[in-house]
Image (tube, grey):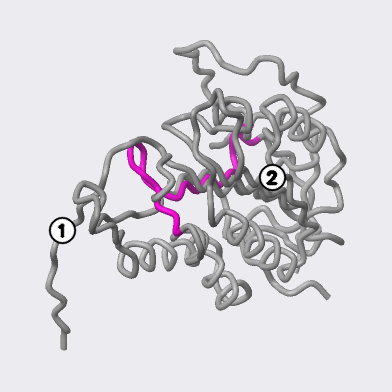
Amino acid sequence: MSDTVENMDDGSIKDDTDARGTLGWFKPQDSSGVILGSLDSEDYFMNYPKRGKCLIFNHKMFESHTGLNKRNGTDADSARLYVRFRELGFDAKVYTDLKVKEVQKELQKIGKEDHTEYSCFVCCILSHGEQGIIYAADGHYKTELLFAPFRGDVCPTLAGKPKMFFIQACQGDRLDSGVSLQSKESSDSDTNQRNLRIPTHADFLIVYSTVPGFYSWRNTTNGSWFVQSFSTALQKHGYDKDILQILTIVNRRVAYDFESFTPQDANMHLKKQVPCVTSTLTKNVRFRPIH
């Protein structure tokens, strides 16, 4: 948050639940989505008429009562993401400095839309944060608010399709001092129809710029380490690698290529960072060119 720094057969056994769910205001709809392509394919079917929508929530300014600093450099991140996802065929839109209720309203609106002609969905968040929460202009909201409108039972036209979230924000205030190492060199679609039930939380990819509990760093001119690396990797490998391969490259670049430089503040100097990927994807996501 610092400014210098951010199964399945027909006889399945029914299991009980151990906890009460959250965000119950997202009412499940008729969850009978239809997906194209072979169910046995290793890759998601990405040849729908349109690639998908890409929402970019760019939070730079915050109301004074939040006590949050201006996020200099975030506009560079926003511009990079907009260009990269447009290049990949997404319908991208940037939202700037929305309040909590405005973020919630927009997510609910998009979640209720018909995504039948879209292959996937992307949402990017650029803001301050702490573990489990994201800040908007006037306060914070739980990260679950981002995902709930797009669950398979809430947004059936995205069921079975990849829903990807990229979050550039701190997840705490711990600092990673790194560890020293020495490098040593060593010598077509399915015509058969099948009924399928899938978990409502399947097919999500959630990527945080840093691991839980830690800072996420941002250069006040060039933007965040994570978005710089992600943008470069998408530009170079967007069409020849699947998204998890791309994100492995991003992890490597952030981990190896960046280190904080704040000699005037010894506690913040020479610190490291690595992104964190959480996936319930059931296939590979490949952004093949749209013809």
SS at badge 2: loop
Which residue is at the front of the view, 245 or 271?
Answer: 271
Residue 109: percent from left, percent from top:
82, 33
Amino acid at pointer 1: Val
Left or right position of 185 against 189? left
Whether 204 is among the magenta residues is: yes
Left or right position of 155 against 167? right
* Residue appearing at x 53%, y 37% in the figure: 7
Q: Mark 2: few, some, or many residues within 10 Å (few <14, many ≥20)?
A: many
Amino acid at pointer 2: Gly
Residue 125: percent from left, percent from top:
60, 45
Residue 245: percent from left, percent from top:
47, 66
> What residue did someone put label 1 on?
179
The C terminus sits in image quarter: bottom right
Picture quadrant of residue 225: bottom left
203 w.r.t. 241: above or below: above
Picture quadrant of residue 239: bottom right
Q: Main secondary structure of the magenta part?
A: loop
> What residue did someone put label 2 on?
160
110 w.r.t. 223: above or below: above
SS at badge 1: loop
Residue 55: percent from left, percent from top:
72, 48
* Residue appearing at x 59%, y 34% in the figure: 62
* Residue appearing at x 69%, y 30% in the figure: 99
Left or right position of 105 against 217? right
Q: Which residues are magenta?
A: 198-219
Earlier residue among tags 2 and 1:
2
The N terminus sits in image quarter: top left
Q: Mark 1 and mark 2 in contact (Cβ < 8 Å)? A: no
Which residue is at the front of the view, 168 or 7?
Answer: 168
